[in-house]
Image (spheres, rainbow, N blue to C red):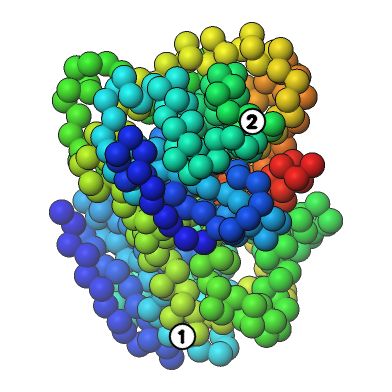
Amino acid sequence: MTKLKHHTVRANGIRQHYIDAGEGPPVVLLHGFPETNYGWRHQIPALARHYRVIAPDLRGYGETEKPFVGYDKRNMAKDLRELMRVLDIPKIALVGHDRGARVATRFAKDHPEAVDRLVVMDNVPTRIVAREFNAKMAQIYWFFMFHLVPDLPEALIIGREDQWLRHLFSEWCYNPQTISGDVFDTYVAAYRSPGAVRGALSDYRANAEDVAQDMADADTKIACPTLSLWGAEFEGVGKMFDMPAVWAEMASDLRTFAVPESGHLVQEEQPEIVNGLLIDFLKGWVG
Amino acid sequence: MKRLSIKVDGIPTSYLTAGESGPLLLLLHGTYWSRVWQPVLEDLTKAGLRPVAVDLPGFGRSGGAPTPAEATVPALARWAVRFVEALGEADKPVLLGGHDIGGGIAQQMLIDAALDIPRLMLMNAVMYDSWPAPTVMRFRDPDVAAATTPADILAARRQSVIAALARPASEAEILEWLDPWTDPRVARSWLSMAVSADHRYTMALVPALKASAKPKLLIWGEDDGFQKIEFAERFAAEIPNTRLVRIPKSGHIPTENDAPRIAREMIGFFKG
């Protein structure tokens, strides 16, 4: 049984909550939306047998502080860089899913000296979403636009967080009932905590800054070994984009994998496949 | 909406109903319970129907514990007639709907013609040789059935409920659905139905169904992995006067995915 320790420290000016498990070379897991670090519950025990696993709640999510500002991906990457400083960790292997993959991508570009290898899960990079956006994408990425509207989403969602999450989990998973029972309740409780809806929406509302940051260094490819994996059955990513080509624009040392019978939440939908891919890719990371 | 009880064969029989007047609409469940119809009952009542969603003996909130012989499709069809007699409605037309194995019972009742059934609706129902689903089939092995405990059944029902809801469900919802099976008597009743699940009953009805001109409505959750829509498509093509309504993004219990749509379709059909 892996010992999971929950900690809260102050870094980059906010209280950051993270799970710390295992010993060895450090591996950081960054969750996405609509999740928290609870989304890594299948990975943490498997990875903690070989590594020190650190899974923070991102700015605005879970038990981490939900300030009103600072959600651009450069600053969210800095959240992690400062957390590493507090923990005295100079270099990591970095894994990000969804919004966490955007933070991880920005981290790899802004702090290349601090990342040994990178995994991005079910994510189309920020500037490529912006570049390719069209009517067909809008049907599936409607939430992307909806979350950008000021104030109205909060008014419609708060008090009905369960309906919001039920819809998203149904639409985004290959098996729509994947997130059921205590797991669903855990996410509903997380998004019902004060500021949680606003926190997640703020992450989306940094889109203009995020695109500008991503455009500014578009010519610089991520040089560290990069693994891009995605759910083979998700309409918004694997079925819509030529993912190996998309990520070849971003990273020079790339490998890719389409996870079968999976939608967007690859790490929750196919944990055994994802754990195997991670353990294989992390081989050689010695800290 | 209210839950009432009436004795059938001396056994307290529970049913959900709403409304005081209007034509009787008898709604049958299969391997679940009356809960499958609950989301549409209020809408049906507002439209002037009198829905009665009964719990079969040993199921849901009803008393009793049927033997396998009492839990076959023909035996339960005869029981349902006795239930309607107990309600004092056997001399009037009875509108009929069935879900899952309850749909098999409903087909049997239409053909047996012990009651005047002018219209039949089937929702993700067993038909032809579409059943038993593997989750039910495995209990037909006498060794498996003998070794199955109420706790095993509760655990298996939990997996089936989660899959049937075909959407994220809270733990409280799952526990509400499972509640009857926490009673070992109800779990054993479920096992009786599972042991008796046999597509020979529905296959035997096919020739008579092909000769039936009565209006039939199929309501189908498209993504049902237990009762697949291909069977409904075949039924709609082969059985006269049948209309199939597909409910997208819905599973085995589509009333849990799109109740307003299903209520609208049922109202249009039964009042038509």
Circles 1 and 2, Cβ within 8 Å, touching? The answer is no
Label 2 SS: loop
Kind of residue at disc 1? Pro
- Residue located 16% across and 25% down the image: B147
In the orientation shown, which residue stands out farthest toward the right?
A: A135
Number of disc labels? 2
Which chain contains the residue that carries disc 1?
A
- Relative placement, left or right, of B87 versus B215 is left
Which residue matches tag 2?
Answer: B117
Q: Is residue B136 above or below residue A258?
A: above
Quadrant assignment, res B233: top right
Q: Identify residue type, mark 2.
A: Ile
Which mark is drawn over residue A194?
Answer: 1
Count residues near mark 2 (Cα–Cα under 10 Å), then give few for <14, some for 14-19, many for 20+.
some
Number of the front mark, 1 or 2: 2
Mark 1 crowd level (few <14, some 14–19, many ≥20, 10 Å Cα): few
Q: Residue at x 40, y 64 (%)?
A: A185
Chain that bears disc 2: B
Report whether B155 appears left or right of B128.
left
Residues at marks 1 and 2 on the same chain: no
Distance from the alpha carbon under mark 1 to that under mark 2: 55 Å
